[in-house]
Every structure is written in structure tokens, then in C-alpha cells.
Image (tube, rainbow, N blue to C red):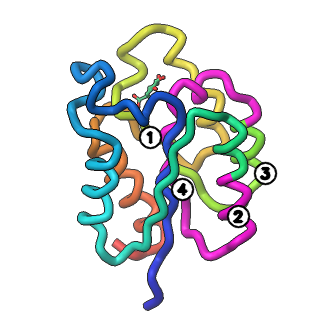
Amino acid sequence: MSAISILVMNGPNLSRLGKREPEIYGSLTLDAINRGIAGAFPEVRFEFFQSEHEGALLEKLFEIEDRGGFAGVVLNAGAFTHYSIALRDAISSIKVPVVEVHLSNVHRREEFRHKSVISAVCNGVIAGFGVESYHLGVRALLGSLGRR
Ligand code: DQA
């Protein structure tokens, strides 16, 4: 079987993991999280991307859509989740499936985090399991392809 490619993409402030509100987001850096994901799924070819910029996230989605060969995207869009119609439109414009993930349980937090403008155009949503949310996102994509 050929290797599967998955993009793990993180939005604003997630570059600060490890330093940022560890009581909410845990103490692992984004690099450590990404290494953990790669180690847990050796059969998958991962690409990792993070940006503080909305447009850069859109461009990355278009890039992998046009390159082809990607089984899906595991996306933690950070605060863009709650208000970026541009990100929503980009996700709904591509064919590659996107799984929305969050480290924290956004529904247990401030009211403005309860609404996601991207959920409706994602294949599914996983929130509240810390680093495990990303792993579950990868598992969901592999499961939908019958690969786990
Ligand atoms: C987050 C939740 C968002 O509300 C917040 O803006 C983030 C991180 C999470 O992973 O729990 O930056 O997406």
C-alpha cells in the first residue's frame, strides 16, 4: 500500500504552546506534539504547518489541494475557528477532508468559543483531549480510508 499523506496545520498562537497558558493547553511545545504524532503513525507521511496569519493557512490548504495526494488535514485553527469566514470558505472550496481539532474543550470555556464557523464544513470535530485530540484526528482520517 502506498504511504498516506496528512497535513497537520495549526493557526495563531499555537506556536507558543509550552509557554502559553499551560494549565489550559498543556506543557508540550508544538514541535514535541508534532514529533509525537509522527512517532505514533509511522505509516503516514506528515506535513506540519503553523502560521499566525489567516491568509497563509488558506494558501497552505490550496497548495495541498493542488498538489494532490493528501488524504486529509488535521486542523487546529486556534481563534480563527470562531470568526474566520475566509477559512471556512477555503475549507468548503477544497475536496481534501478536514478534521477540526482543539486541545481544550471549547464548550466548557468562554461563550465566544462555543461557536465554530468552520465545523459545518469540516468532516468532524474533536475537542478537549489535549494532545490526544490531534491523534484522534489522524485516526479519524485513517479510519475513513479503512486504514486503521
Ligand atoms: C484552541 C481553542 C481556541 O478557542 C483558542 O483560540 C486556541 C486554541 C484549542 O486548541 O483548544 O487558540 O483551538
Q: Is residue 12 left or right of residue 142?
A: right
Q: Which residue is mark 2?
A: 65
Distance, label 3 to label 4, CA atoms, is 14 Å
The secondary element bearing badge 1 is classed as strand
Identify the amino acid type marked 4: Val
The answer to the question of whether label 4 and label 2 lie on touching residues, with beta carbons closer than 8 A, is: no
Q: Residue at x 44, y 8 (%)?
A: 110
Q: Which residue is mark 3?
A: 93
Q: What is the quadrant of residue 54 in the picture?
A: top right
The span shown in magenta is 60-86
Q: Position of residue 20 (x, y in %)?
A: 32, 23
Q: Residue at x 43, y 73 (%)?
A: 45
The secondary element bearing badge 4 is classed as strand
Q: Position of residue 15 (x, y in %)?
A: 42, 36
Mark before the other along the chain sequence, 2 or 1 = 2
Identify the amino acid type marked 3: Ser
The answer to the question of whether label 3 and label 1 lie on touching residues, with beta carbons closer than 8 A, is: no
Distance, label 1 to label 4, CA atoms, is 10 Å
Q: Which residue is mark 1?
A: 101
The secondary element bearing badge 3 is classed as helix
Mark before the other along the chain sequence, 4 or 2 = 2
Mark before the other along the chain sequence, 3 or 1 = 3
Distance, label 4 to label 2, CA atoms, is 10 Å
Q: Which residue is mark 4?
A: 73
Question: Does the magenta segment cover residue 19?
Answer: no
